[in-house]
Image (cartoon, rainbow, N blue to C red):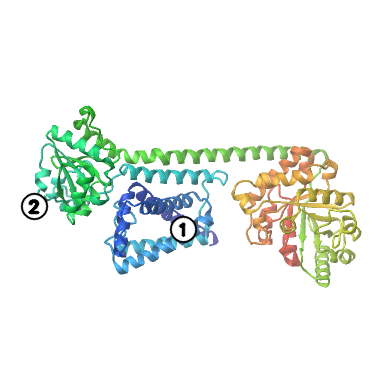
Amino acid sequence: MKNQRNLLFSVIGYICRTALAITFLFSGYVKAIDPLGMNYKLQAYMQHFGIAIAPESLWMSIAVVALASIEFLLGIQILLGIQRRLSTRAALAFMSIMTLITLYIFIADPVADCGCFGDALKLTNGQTLLKNILLLLATIVLLLHPEAMHRLISTRHEWITSTFSAIYIISLALYSYHYLPLIDFTAYKQGINLTKAIEGELGEEAQKELAATAFWNAKGDDVTYDILLDTGYTFLLISPNLNDADDGISDRINDLHDYTTDKAYTFYGVTTEPGSDESIHNWTDRSGAAYEFIFADAEQLKAMVRSNPGLLLLKNGQILKKWSKNNLPETDNDKIDLTALYSESTASASSGLAKLLEWFFIPLIFFIFADNLWIGSKYYKRYRHRRKLKNHKTKNLKTNNHMRKKIVAGNWKMNKNLQEGVALAKELNELLTADKPNCGVIICTPFIHLATVSQEIDHNVLALGAENCADKASGAFTGEVSAEMVKSTGAEYVILGHSERRAYYGETAEMLKEKVNLALENGLKVIFCIGELLEERKSGKQNDVVRAQIEGSLFDLTAEQFANIVLAYEPVWAIGTGETATAEQAEDMHAFIRNVVAQKFGSQVAEDTTILYGGSCKPSNAKELFAKPDVDGGLIGGASLKAADFKGIIDAWK
């Protein structure tokens, strides 16, 4: 039953993750491919609130690029399982805001469709609200169950993927602003025959918008069919708003007009009618235009060419080619080959999707493949090392039947007064005397407990240790307790280098080196703690951190001295948080630690070294952790303060 429930949660999580990632990716892509179309949609919202702003203003463009980038990057993060908690929290904040906005749009109805997917997929305001509510629920599911987002790329390389994705989507948006969308989502696609659309011969749902296509002249006469039935080439300079049109290209436009006049082609400027006389007069003054203007609906012009101005070429009512203001055709030496434009435009339109795949998805898939190869090689090296240690261990067992010691050690930290501590120690002693453990058991208590507890326990059953000692042998160091003092209480062990001592009391590698040497000189065995912070693991630096901790404090020892060292790996992010490194993560790090020891002291010493796991080990997970070949026990915190829980962990060795 439990397995079925887990399977159900996994399926739900996978569905939520996939739906959320695909939606974010698609929405971000559409906005980046057609940014000016999104500008027009935002302008409609601004007009609803009485805010006058040009669609091609810098701030509007920045807003669209930012929105596209946020959605696309969230999609990539969720799809690949990058920074799972951060990604789901960001997605929750984003979807909460979007849901509130679409709720207002649904109630106030300021626009016909919200434009979240641009012209690629038009939804009603009600459909958009429903979509956002479902996506918000999916985000909550992933926030509560981030484990459903299995990582598809290593933490070491995830920043490369995120950076590449950000550069790509921003570059795509800027490219589409400068030129034209790689994929034309509007109804006015290259190759479409407007005459057939108007007469209803195409019969496609997507062409309903084209049926309203119309042009008229300054006298108000309909000239639609005059233009569409022209058997020659017709150039239309499209400008939804002449006042905001870029006049920096007027020389090229005028050259093109002169070229069409010489070739007896038709050339019109097309704009909207409101205030047209003044707008046309201003444009003529700014640009020196000598061509005739006709008029069309503003929404029609915005869809025809995503540029202001933009150029559209017609013949027999068919759209042959579109140009942005930034790549108008050259007219030098009459080099325009109009007969080749149709085939060129068809090839260009069909290659838009191919370019998107070529520029992003193919490199991304290649990088993920390379990353998995890197991970595979890393695990293969670990596998070879484990096999080497295992073979050495087998050989050693055959010769002298030697095996490293298994230990469960309790770290009481700053808990229990003297009476409570003595009572707990007695209870543990009785339990372990009655039921002999299959491992060494140590309790490390506050200093004030040591001498009294030492008298109350059987040291053959239960060993005693301190939680710290000074880095000085003796002297005027008020409040400090030396290694010699610890030894005099009857203690046999001392914990050194615990993450709390490093974090709260600034203990450095040099200080710990002194403590280790003093402890060994006074006959104490050392439980030496090592481990990484959460940000160090996320950045893939955990191995470097742990290696540096071992090298900085223990590598001055001889092999004989190192035999009195017990290592305790404590992933700091899993201490006292309820979080636990998986058994596989613990085993990987323990194997790495053993390899570090082997490189310095040799494989025999490494094989003999006891390495404990110290990250929220509990009776419920101890058996799984201790089953790993390189995990030799645990350094237990909170669970060691209750005799039953501590005994449950000890019994994991049975």
Q: Which amino acid lies under the numbered mark 1 shown in the image of this protein?
A: Ala
Q: Residues within 10 Å of mark 2 (few under 14, many from 20)?
A: few
* Label placed on residue 242: none
Q: Nearer the viewer, mark 2 or mark 1?
A: 2
The quadrant in which residue 438 appears is: bottom right
Res 219 label: 2
Please report the residue visible at 46 percent of the width from the left and 49 percent of the height from the top. 76
Q: Give percent across and percent down for residue 189.
A: 23, 44
Where disc 1 sits, the SS reads helix
Q: Residue at x 74, y 37 (%)?
A: 599
**Label 1, residues with CA under 10 Å away: few <14, some 14-19, many ≥20:** many
Give the SS element for disc 2. loop
Q: Residue at x 66, y 37 (%)?
A: 384
Residue situated furthest front in the rendering: 285
Q: Position of residue 20 (x, y in %)?
A: 42, 55
Q: Is residue 618 left or right of residue 395?
A: left
Horizontal placement of 7 versus 571: left or right? left
From the viewer's side, name the closer residue of 434 and 378: 378
Percent position (x, y) of residue 97? 42, 63
Which mark is first along the chain, 1 or 2?
Answer: 1
The numbered mark at residue 91 is: 1
The answer to whether residue 654 of the structure is visible from this angle is no
364 relative to 355 in the view: left or right: right
| Residue 503 picture quarter | bottom right
- The total of numbered circles placed on residues is 2
Instruction: Please state which of residues 113 and 408 is positioned toward the viewer in this rendering.
Output: 113
Give the amino acid type for the residue marked by disc 2 in the picture.
Lys
Is 319 above or below relative to 651? above
Q: Point out the residue furthest to the bottom here.
A: 419
Where does the image place residue 433, in percent across and percent down from the top left?
83, 63
**Where on the picture, by quarter, is residue 317?**
top left
Quarter of the image that includes the C terminus: bottom right
